Amino acid sequence: MHKEMEYTAVFRVSPTPTLILLPNAPLFTIVDANDSYLTLTNKQREELLGKGFFEVFPTNPYLNDNEWKKSFDAILSTKQAHKLVPQKFASPAIASPTHIDIKYLEIQHTPVLDDCGEIQFIVRSMTDVTESVNHGKFLQETQQAARIGSWEINRALQTISWSQELREIFEMGPEYPLDFHSAMAFYSDTNDRKALSKALQKATHDGTIFRIALPVTTAKGHKRWILTIGKAELVNGICVRIYGTAQDITEKKNTEEALISSEHKFHNLIQTIDGVVWEADAETFEATFISDKVKWLLGYTADEWLADPGFWEKNIYEADRENAVSYCQKHTKKSANHTFDYRMVKKNGDIIWIKDIVSVISESNKPRWLRGIMVDITEAKRFAELNQLERTILELNEKKDASIEHILSTYVLGIEALFPGMACSINQIRNGRLFSWIAPSLPTAYLQHIHNLPIGEYAGSCGSAAYTKKPVIVADIANNPLWADFKEQPLNHGLKSCWSSPVVNAQGEVVAVFGIYYKHIRNPNEDELAFIDRAGAFLNMILENHHHAELAQETTLMMQQGQALAHLGTWQWDIESDHVTWSDTLFDIYGLDKAAYTPGFSAYLSRVHADDRQRVYDILHNAIKKGKDTVFEERIVRPEGEIRHLRSWAKLVLKADGSRKMIGACLDITEAKLAELALNKLHAEIEQQLKIVAESEKKYSNLFHLSPQPMWVYDLDTYRFLDVNDAAIKHYGYTREEFLAMTIRDIRPPEEIPKMEAAVAYSKQHDELFTTSVYVHRKKSGERIYVEVKSNIIKFHGRKAEVILAHDISEKLDYIQAIEAQNKKLQDIAWMQSHVVRAPLARIMGLADLIQHCPDSGIESDELLGAIKDSATELDNILRDITDKTEQISR
């Protein structure tokens, strides 16, 4: 769903006017249209969606609509893309809607096939080639040719004469009759004859020079283009003759068409690069060219950028501005190409990360131009920084002295740094009420106001999210019914929008709400929606872990308190002197008066139950003989005849003088032995506690098995896999059974095994060790991947093992290598654009100037035309080479 929304958003803002149709001939129902198409056709999206194409666009006044139908029919029959020649369209002028702009658009119909190879959609895209068409006309008007043939119409004598060169152009033999009518007959098109007659009449009337290029059919039936230049000679206001030149410009026409085609290819090349291509003055940084992709990247048009000399510097994010500008200046002065990352502010206020790849063009050994491409790296940058933030929080969470408030505050501040302008909060939910908790950037007065508010369906964003257990997005607090009773407080503090996501524990209870505030009206984009889901899941994991840790601490405290309250007595026995000392508690356990009783080993044995006496004697003497500690249970008989049950500990200690003594303790466990009912109840409580622990272990197991990153546990002695999660199974291609029958050597290429074995040997030397390394792994398919491995030593079912989290960074490394390769190719293209392309263009411009201003230069026209054609061919080959390089970048 996220991907579909992402593609729809990209489609809607695409600068190329595009329409999506169903292949249901003859209706061809319109499914969607992007913003550029709506602007071009002056239509609303509601006027198009669900209607047939020919119902909305029945005709084009400049084109027979059968061509559109034929194009659609060709798509349905061949299932291949079909392109129409550039067509003339009228649309309302942007500056003045009451006027009409004439544009030339190149239309392409492209089929989208489903998995069965059937046409699912037809994409109709329109490319504006008006500039190319107009440029062709401009070339036609500005290029002039040398005198090739001359002609004269003598009005006084009523004769017409052509030079021999002109006769050769029209392929006329010496006997070919020539008069005004036969000359006009070469112009086979009626409109062409009318145009030429009109030009002659105007020159006759006012004596002006005329220039007209028209197609002709020679005497031998060949098609040629002729440029005719003429002037009328007036005597006393009366035209006596008209004379001039005519040039065969057929090759020139072909050259113009080749240039137009090359220019069109170059324009398309620039627009297809996934980034903003730009050029700027190396001294002032003022832009001289910006590709149309800037509208997609920043929301500004190229004209808006070019109209402001300081646009680039002004729109760099304030915190990055000084470093970015100084970095570029420093490398420009050195004429050094450079690449750097910084943030820019979009027209709508969003902040994005830019990678700017810059080539410095020098003239006369001084930097003259900067040319480069800006690429949006926001998603990759934020993804990497968010991963790092989460790793930091997880490491902090492992520290026993880190409070949950400190952990969450660190996380919230990290999020706010990733999304400038965002203020975050984490509120606790208890007993159906909302309590302020973590919000380092929100006003204290506002937090006090929302503290202890009841949750509900209309209780603001956070209260509603907690009540419905669903995310709540409010772009405009002032006008949203959820905030009707609460909007005054946030608005007073400048808070205009609030997005909230509930944190739900494993029991389905909302324990907290993650809130995001902005000081302007704002809806989240696709990246932010994905982040909200990710942040909610991450917070749930942190809070669940903290909850389990608290349970464990409470259990430990209870055990410590139990030990402190236990009835435990201690003793010491000097074996050689038979001197025995008891603690006061031990006298109480035996029921003896400390003042009247002198303890000793024999006296002690006399108090041991007759049935236990010999066994206890043997245990103690065996401990003395072997020097080993011992634990045993015994029964004693108090003076009043009461029998008490003791658990006793004894330890032999050797003194510095060689003498021996034994120390020990006795725990009265009589109540535990006698209180069977109480013992059963205690067993039940213990079983319940064990169940809670088991459930806790299950939750931790879920964290392991449901982790999106591959994880496994292996035995440090045998290298054998002990457990593996689903992500590892999916990523590496082995089944769980296959994994558990393998060792970690089996997923390494041979050359990596020594490195792995050295790491394992190092791990064996430690009881606690957290490491991070990069290794090469091998999937079941044989594919090799680079992984970042994080490891920690644990006890797994009583065995020393290591838990592994493997993050596949192959794509990241490939991406970096691809970017570096792309940078090199883009620099090659920039160099070709600035150096190689200029040579043939300079020759063409020089030859054109020579033809225009030096008609009597004495250079043969064939030689000039040949030079122009050679230069145009060279330019076309250069542009083809640039196009090939760009296609390599796209691949």
Image (cartoon, rainbow, N blue to C red):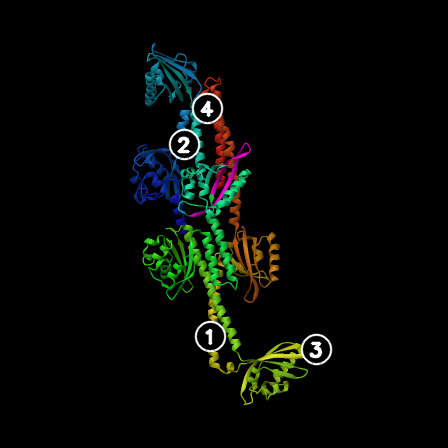
Residue range highlighted in magenta:
350-374
Looking at the image, is mark 4 or mark 2 earlier in the sequence? 2
Please name which of the two marks, 4 or 2, marks the residue nearer to the observer.
4
Looking at the image, is mark 1 or mark 2 earlier in the sequence? 2
* Coordinates of residue 812 in the picture (x, y in percent): 51, 49
Amino acid type shown at disc 3: Gly
User: Which residue does the numbered mark 2 point to in the structure image?
Assistant: 132
Placement of 543 over or under 139, stated as above or below: below
User: Which residue does the numbered mark 3 point to in the structure image?
Assistant: 658
In magenta segment, residue 191: no
Q: Is residue 409 visible?
A: yes
Badge 3 vs badge 4, beta-carbon distance below 8 Å? no
Badge 2 vs badge 3, beta-carbon distance below 8 Å? no
The answer to whether 362 appears left or right of 576 in the picture is: left
Please name which of the two marks, 1 or 4, marks the residue nearer to the observer.
4
Count of numbered labels shown in the rendering = 4
Badge 4 vs badge 2, beta-carbon distance below 8 Å? no
Placement of 478 over or under 222, stated as above or below: below
Badge 2: residue crowd in 10 Å (few <14, some 14–19, many ≥20): some
Report, in whole angstroms, how far the alpha carbon at label 1 lies from the one at label 2: 86 Å
Q: Determine whether the residue tagged by mark 4 lies in a helix, strand or loop.
A: helix
Which residue is depicted at the point 49% across and 82% down?
675
